[in-house]
Image (tube, grey):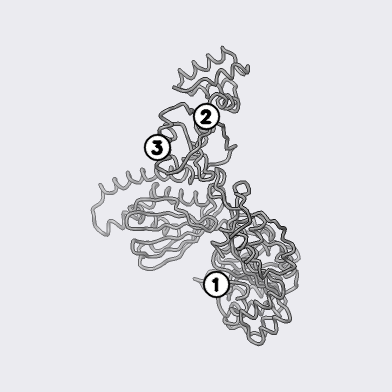
């Protein structure tokens, strides 16, 4: 029986009359509502009810104040248990599972909670929550897992009907697949995955078959997380549905294929770039999510600050020359290019970009999508751009000798050229250009900046734990700053405060979003001499240090010391 002692507190405080209380009790009895719900209908606020219950039970109250509970947290308590016993997970703090409960006097609920905690091997802490908030959190279960369970049920029915009406021949199997992928269950299933990946700020979706299950993973902030485990029997239909969307060949399963499609999700046009790949258990599919309507961050928000920001701004102010960004796939190069274009985007300039694909739409810039399959690649596109009277040119990537030489020529003839290159660091840009066939004597007069970058997960400001800068951690920081330029070292405030990720209800992983760490190399007379005599990375690094360049890792250490990222997150990437 529910504990109703809290109503005495409401009566004592004069928040409700005896007549209204009796009416509320009668309504709860006849309608099946909880007493708290009837009291709220009678005009008592949930905050007043929680305060009274806290005084009686000694259990603190908690409110998420409108924040969502992530599916990662909801998975700790099954939806049916939450509905039956009226408790829900709120988050994890310091390794302790926080539970919100409506009626802590319910012995069955306490026993169920003990069972769940022992199965998870995790301690728990109980908080009182209002019935309104309980219902709001219960609705959050109807996310990816809930929607997918419903769709799987619909698919089971469709497949059963299909089996009854089809004979088991190989020709019929293909026809059946083509038919079923156009039907509601599979269409919904793919749509649900795309929707939740986009809403969850994923950059990529991986659909991975194995011997007995189909795993769906989302890459969020550079890290892959398992979002769904599905039965293998839906694998072929899901892959076929994606192939139909991208106009890939349905019957070609022996070799990789590429494609793309667009979909409208939450009133935004989202582009998806798709790659299929044959594996031992069937085709694996990778889907890159490109939200071209996302806003472009300014240079400072991207992570450029201090000397790096000043150097980049100075490089962008030059009337012509080549600026190259470098780093592996997914290191944020293209996003930084967009930030630079936004900085340069003025009416007096004709800015033309050549991209594969267009990731963001920027007003005032003439953006063009390359189509290698019809012969429109970066090299041919760059030749055409030079006939368009451009002031500023952005080329998505320099992949070959021809594109490199055209970019150098454009920079020499009075244009600002921005592009990316695949090397590990800014130091490697010059040797890479030479390897691609660019004449050494053409590099000094054209290359303004070489920028290396990586993306590091950022700590949630309200979900981080301060750790002392001492012992092994201090020794590690000191070692990292050993070769740090003296003028830069003076700007560091000691004693510095460093933090580590601390999962919470509002930030389940302790990190959210990513920020760039950079190294910026500029051209100098000394560097020109090194290039002309035959550049080595050791010689270039020596000159870069003389300039006062800080490495990406050192830039990361600075961001550790000002609390934006954790040392663990930096070490994972660099």
**How many labels sit on residues?**
3
Quickly name the residue at label 2: 131
Up/down of 445 relative to 145, above or below = below
Q: Could you tell me which secondary element the residue under label 3 belongs to?
A: helix
Name the side, left or right, on which 303 lies relative to 369. Answer: right
What label does residue 176 carry, if any?
none
Question: If you read the primary sequence from the N terminus, does the residue marked by circle 3 or circle 2 appear first?
Answer: 3
Residue at screen point 60% across, 28% down: 47
Residue at screen point 35% across, 63% down: 251
Label 3 Cα crowd, 10 Å radius (few <14 / some 14-19 / many 20+): few
Image location (x, y in percent) of residue 199: 53, 49
Q: Which of 349 and 2 is in front in this view?
A: 2
Q: Nearer the viewer, residue 54 or 43?
A: 54
Image location (x, y in percent) of residue 387: 66, 75
Judged by depth in the image, the label closer to the viewer, 3 or 2, is 3
Quickly name the residue at label 1: 376
Q: Could you tell me which secondary element the residue under label 1 belongs to?
A: loop
Judged by depth in the image, the label closer to the viewer, 3 or 1, is 3
Label 2 Cα crowd, 10 Å radius (few <14 / some 14-19 / many 20+): many
Question: What is the quadrant of residue 433 in the picture?
Answer: bottom right
| Figure quadrant of the C terminus | bottom right
Instruction: Estimate the spatial distance between the alpha carbons at disc 3 and disc 2, rounded to whole Å.
Output: 23 Å
Query: Would you say the residues marked 2 and 1 are in contact, meaning their CB atoms lie under 8 Å apart?
Result: no
Q: Is residue 382 visible?
A: yes
Quickly name the residue at label 3: 115
């Amino acid at each position: 029986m529910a504990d109703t002692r809290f109503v005495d507190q409401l009566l004592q405080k004069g928040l409700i009359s005896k007549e209204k209380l009796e009416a509320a009790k009668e309504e709860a009895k006849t309608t099946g509502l909880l007493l708290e719900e009837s009291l709220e209908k009678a005009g008592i606020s949930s905050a007043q009810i929680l305060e009274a219950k806290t005084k009686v039970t000694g259990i603190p109250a908690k409110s998420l104040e409108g924040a969502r509970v992530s599916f990662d947290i909801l998975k700790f308590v099954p939806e049916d248990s939450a509905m039956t016993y009226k408790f829900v997970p709120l988050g994890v703090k310091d390794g302790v599972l926080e539970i919100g409960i409506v009626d802590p006097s319910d012995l069955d609920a306490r026993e169920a909670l003990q069972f769940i905690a022992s199965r998870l091997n995790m301690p728990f802490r109980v908080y009182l929550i209002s019935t309104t908030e309980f219902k709001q959190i219960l609705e959050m279960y109807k996310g990816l897992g809930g929607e997918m369970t419903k769709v799987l049920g619909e698919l089971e029915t469709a497949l059963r009907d299909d089996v009854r009406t089809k004979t088991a021949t190989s020709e019929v199997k293909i026809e059946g697949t083509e038919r079923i992928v156009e039907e509601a269950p599979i269409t919904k299933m793919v749509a649900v995955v795309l929707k939740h990946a986009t809403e969850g700020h994923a950059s990529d979706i991986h659909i991975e078959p194995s011997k007995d299950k189909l795993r769906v993973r989302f890459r969020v902030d550079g890290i892959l997380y398992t979002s769904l485990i599905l039965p293998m029997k839906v694998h072929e239909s899901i892959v076929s549905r994606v192939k139909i969307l991208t106009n890939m060949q349905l019957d070609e399963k022996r070799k990789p294929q590429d494609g793309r499609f667009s979909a409208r999700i939450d009133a935004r046009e989202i582009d998806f770039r798709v790659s299929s790949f044959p594996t031992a258990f069937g085709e694996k599919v990778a889907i890159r999510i490109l939200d071209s309507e996302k806003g472009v961050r300014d240079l400072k928000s991207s992570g450029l600050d201090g000397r790096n920001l000043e150097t980049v701004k100075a490089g962008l102010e030059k009337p012509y020359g080549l600026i190259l960004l470098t780093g592996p796939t997914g290191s944020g190069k293209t996003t930084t290019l967009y930030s630079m274009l936004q900085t340069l985007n003025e009416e007096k300039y004709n800015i033309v970009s050549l991209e594969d694909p267009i990731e963001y739409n920027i007003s005032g810039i003439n953006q063009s999508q390359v189509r290698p399959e019809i012969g429109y690649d970066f090299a041919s596109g760059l030749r055409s751009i030079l006939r368009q009277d451009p002031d500023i040119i952005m080329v998505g990537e320099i992949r070959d000798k021809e594109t490199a030489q055209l970019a150098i020529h454009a920079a020499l003839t009075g244009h600002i050229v921005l592009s990316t290159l695949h090397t590990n660091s800014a130091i490697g840009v010059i040797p890479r250009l030479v390897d691609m066939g660019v004449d050494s004597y053409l590099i000094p007069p054209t290359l303004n900046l070489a920028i290396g970058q990586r993306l590091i997960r950022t700590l949630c400001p309200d979900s981080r734990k301060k750790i002392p800068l001492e012992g092994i951690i201090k020794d590690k920081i000191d070692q990292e700053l050993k070769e740090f330029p003296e003028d830069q070292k003076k700007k560091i405030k000691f004693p510095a405060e460093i933090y580590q990720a601390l999962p919470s209800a509002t930030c389940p992983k302790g990190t959210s979003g990513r920020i760039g760490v950079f190294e910026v190399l500029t051209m100098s007379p000394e560097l020109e001499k090194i290039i002309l005599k035959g550049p080595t990375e050791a010689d270039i690094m020596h000159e870069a240090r003389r300039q006062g360049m800080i490495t990406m890792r050192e830039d990361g250490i600075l961001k550790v010391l000002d609390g934006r990222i954790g040392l663990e997150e930096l070490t994972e990437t660099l």
